Image (cartoon, rainbow, N blue to C red):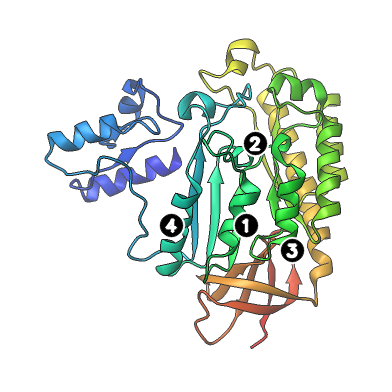
Amino acid sequence: IGRINSLKSVKKKRPEVIIALTGCLVDSRTEELERRFPWIDLFFPPQELGPLHAWATARGIPLPAEPVSLPSSQPSLTAMIPIIQGCNSFCSYCIVAYRRGREKSRQPDEILCHVQNLIKHGSKEITLLGQNIGAYGRDLPEKTDLARLLALLQEVDGLQRIRFLTNHPKDMDRSLMEAIAHLDKVCEHVSLPVQAGDDRILAQMRRGYTARQYLNTIEEMRSVIPNLSISTDVIVGFPGETDEQFAGTVRVLEQVRFDRVHVAAYSPRPGTLATRKYADDVPPETKQARLQQVEALHERIAAEINAPLLGTTVQVLVEGRHKGKWSGRTRTDKLVFFTHRDDLTGQLVDVKVEKTTAWALQGTCQR
């Protein structure tokens, strides 16, 4: 919504610019969105291109019959590629399954061609995307899975790194763990949302696992994948969450010690099961206090995780310049800043770490 609001000034300065919005915010009833955001020209639900084609045809704007994925004239070094749309999980707080529909995977050959085109036009790292990426391939006529797709993309010349997100704990199987461990282009970083650490709350969220099952998955991942970094998502203040239940979430965070935690306070999403079934009864001030407690805990743990990197050398894919320093990320998704006189954009460089914080590393390039 913040991004949509920022486009209001663009439309005012350049009224000829056409702005269209799709995604989980949009369903077939767009009247309220049209009222809230009158500077947007067109709203259409994800994967439903009919309204876009009708709108364009009425204005004499030619569009292809099917969506086409092409690299831009100035492609990103780190490109993102959707490989599966939709979700079959129907978590009670989430609108994705309703707005994007059931899981639908792209064919491996199509993805391979897309990746090859991106590499040809300058990309070095790709991130495979899906609302539930671990389910990739199950719906295809010739069954495959994410591990086999990663092995296929491993062979692409010029591709240096592969990432993927977001995962559901129930789909983090041994074959995927082995792929991360043994395919040298696949980065040792996994996003695995836990959402809560109390079994009753997890059941009300319809997450499909207990806190102990989640912890067992983490333990297995760490036993298979050396130097693994893990990020997670947490929702605080879910309907009915007591202090004791929130304490269960804190215990999980303390036990796992995630490299990164994305935390949000629960808010009702119209159309979801949680909105229909549960009262939003946790006071806003309680939600905010819990959110701040998680943020403070994460900052302490992340700082402790990063501190031993002081004095070590890390490999960084240089993405660009920020406030006078070059920046990029390690294979484990640590943000790194360093100084150097030359333009190193797109290169893999070694950086000696001279300062660590919870949020980033700083150092000197070793060349």
Under circle 1, the secondary element is helix
The picture quadrant where one finds residue 6 is top left
Foreground residue among 85 and 105: 105
Local packing at callout 2 (Cα closer than 10 Å; few below 14, some 14-19, many 20+) is some
Q: Quadrant of residue 366?
A: bottom right
- Which of marks 2 and 4 precedes in the sequence? 4
Q: Residues within 10 Å of mark 1 (few under 14, many from 20)?
A: some
Q: Quadrant of the C terminus?
A: bottom right
Give the residue at x 42% y 68%: 120
Please, is residue 107 above or below residue 338 in the view? above
Q: Which residue is mark 2?
A: 264
- Of labels 4 and 3, earlier in sequence is 4
Residue drawn 66% across the image and 26% down it: 284
- What residue does disc 4 label? 113
Residue 123, image x and y in percent? 47, 66
Location of residue 71 in the rendering, given as x and y in whole percent from the top left corner: 37, 59
Circle 2: residue type: Ala
- Relative to residue 40, is residue 316 drawn left or right? right
Chain-order first, disc 1 or disc 2? 1
Separation of marks 1 and 4 at Cα, in angstroms: 15 Å
State which tag comes first along the sequence, 3 or 1: 1
Alpha carbons under labels 3 and 1: distance apart: 34 Å
Residue behind mark 3: 357
Disc 3 crowd rating (10 Å Cα; few below 14, some 14-19, many 20+) is some
The amino acid type found where label 1 is placed reads Ala
Whether residue 38 is visible to the viewer of this picture, yes or no, is no
Three-letter amino acid code at the position of disc 3: Thr
